[in-house]
Amino acid sequence: MNTVIETILNHRSIRSFEDKPLTREQIEIIVESAQAASTSSYIQAYSIIGVTDREKKKKLAELAGNQSYVEENGHFFVFCADLFRHEYIGKMEGKDVIPSIESTEKFMVALIDASLAAQNASLAAESLGLGICYIGGIRNNLDEVGKLLNIPERVIPLFGLAVGYPKKMTDKKPRLPLSHVYHEEQYNTDHYEEELTSYNKVISSYYKERTGGKRTDTWTEQMANMLEKQSRMYMKNYVEGQKFNKQ
Amino acid sequence: MNTVIETILNHRSIRSFEDKPLTREQIEIIVESAQAASTSSYIQAYSIIGVTDREKKKKLAELAGNQSYVEENGHFFVFCADLFRHEYIGKMEGKDVIPSIESTEKFMVALIDASLAAQNASLAAESLGLGICYIGGIRNNLDEVGKLLNIPERVIPLFGLAVGYPKKMTDKKPRLPLSHVYHEEQYNTDHYEEELTSYNKVISSYYKERTGGKRTDTWTEQMANMLEKQSRMYMKNYVEGQKFNKQ
């Protein structure tokens, strides 16, 4: 065990922050950390938008489903898949890059690039004693988020990252059994059901303990209920409208 | 600056490893670190396959474009987007989850989840004195990779991660100017061209110095040349064939 692994394993999502802004130095070291992540063929296919304007954060919080910690935090980052830059480069260099940047492959590249960067940013923040919470809720309404942040075509806001000084700590949520997620030599479903059943017991006890018995749902129940509801089904059209994932 | 941020900023992709396997303990702490990453609504939509079989790694190296370090390393991980588990859960719980898991939204969720986990794994490995290299090359031929790793529908191998003891260190590659990637309050392209031009000078000098003047290309040249070539254009069909990103 070392400090890096301790920081990684100690992660929990923080949903209540002190009203204390990050310093310029903190913001820059977080972004620099994001940029240090690996990037597919050096493409650097993402951008990060920092939001501090209170009205804008309030609007983002509403769009993200009234999550107060989107408005109340030390800094709010929005991580975006970005191939606008590469369209621009194509024009600069007189090369036709359009079929390439509209491909599903490059959509995937941009998502992966942005996510690797975001996880570096998160760990850098956590190492500074800050808490973080990823905000997928901004994908509830990307047209509105896009208007608010002046997002052009070929850019997709993927998620927010609320960062700040934790006001209330939360518990670590137990993950799937390692053997269920980690397969040796090949994908293997031999013990799928028993692994899920044993994990369900862990999760059910976890909720029971935290809620004084009020909540006892299992992980598979929680997942099945969530996935039965269709959410953000507009995404395919939105993504194609932003000229990603078209061919 | 602290140890975590130092580890993050010190990253470079390693492409030459000693012939020394990782221990079981190292593998488990790397996977456990991956699992500690944030996951969208607790969905845990990824799996990791560890490959040590020499023949299998040799085959993967060929498929990835003859990258020797895919075969020669301490351990080879394959990170997969995984919603097979959630189809299974739907059946277990008697809920129709199919429209949801076939949506573009959940395709994005699985990619983001897998990537956050992978970056944790990478940093955990680097903190242990190991080197890492992401291998997007496995996406050259996912049908063949899928056969080799017994990949079912609703699972997509996204990238490999070669991990091992570094035999040869590499240089850190300079990233885009922070102000080009980090936007304040809204997406802003006011200084786009001058930022790219100034970055081009940095990259051109970087290559010149490293190659004794043989290579002097700029970043925008490199990107335009890469993106002019259409690569992995089969991806949209493949992804839909795996029942992701369909609606």
Image: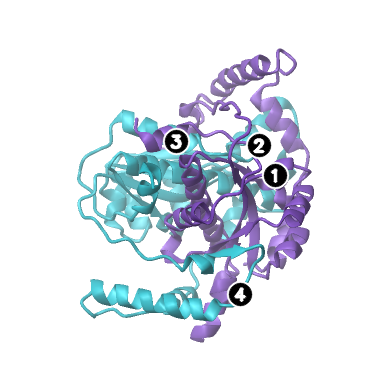
Chain colours: A cyan, B purple
Please give left or right for residue B188 compared with residue A204 in the image: right
**Alpha-carbon span between mark 4 and mark 1:** 28 Å
Q: Residues within 10 Å of mark 4 (few under 14, many from 20)?
A: few
Name the residue rendered at 42%, 65% in the picture: A175
Residue named by callout 1: B72
Q: Residues within 10 Å of mark 1 (few under 14, many from 20)?
A: many
Label 3: few (<14), some (14–19) or many (≥20) C-alpha neighbours in 10 Å: some
The answer to which of marks 1 and 2 sits earlier in the sequence is 2
User: In the image, what residue occupies the spot 50% across and 34% down?
Assistant: A36
Give the alpha-carbon distance from disc 2 to disc 3, as whole Å: 18 Å
Please name the residue that numbered disc 3 is placed on: B7
Q: Quadrant of residue A99?
A: top right
Q: Are marks 4 and 3 in contact (CB under 8 Å)?
A: no
Dot 1 or dot 3, earlier in sequence: 3
Residue B218 in sight from this viewpoint: yes
Determine which residue is flagged by label 4: A189
Q: Amino acid at mark 2?
A: Arg
Q: Report the disc number at residue B15.
A: 2
A155 is higher (above) or lower (below) than A220 = above
Residue A223 at what x, y percent from top left?
A: 45, 74
Mark 2 Cα shell of 10 Å, populated few (<14), some (14-19), many (≥20): many
| Front position among marks 1 and 3 | 1
Which chain letter matches label 1? B
- Give the secondary structure at mark 2: loop
Q: Spatial distance from mark 1 to mark 3, Cα to Cα?
A: 24 Å
**Chain of the residue where label 3 is placed in the rendered structure:** B
Q: Nearer the viewer, residue B22 or A31?
A: B22
Pick whichever of labels 2 and 3 is earlier in the sequence.
3
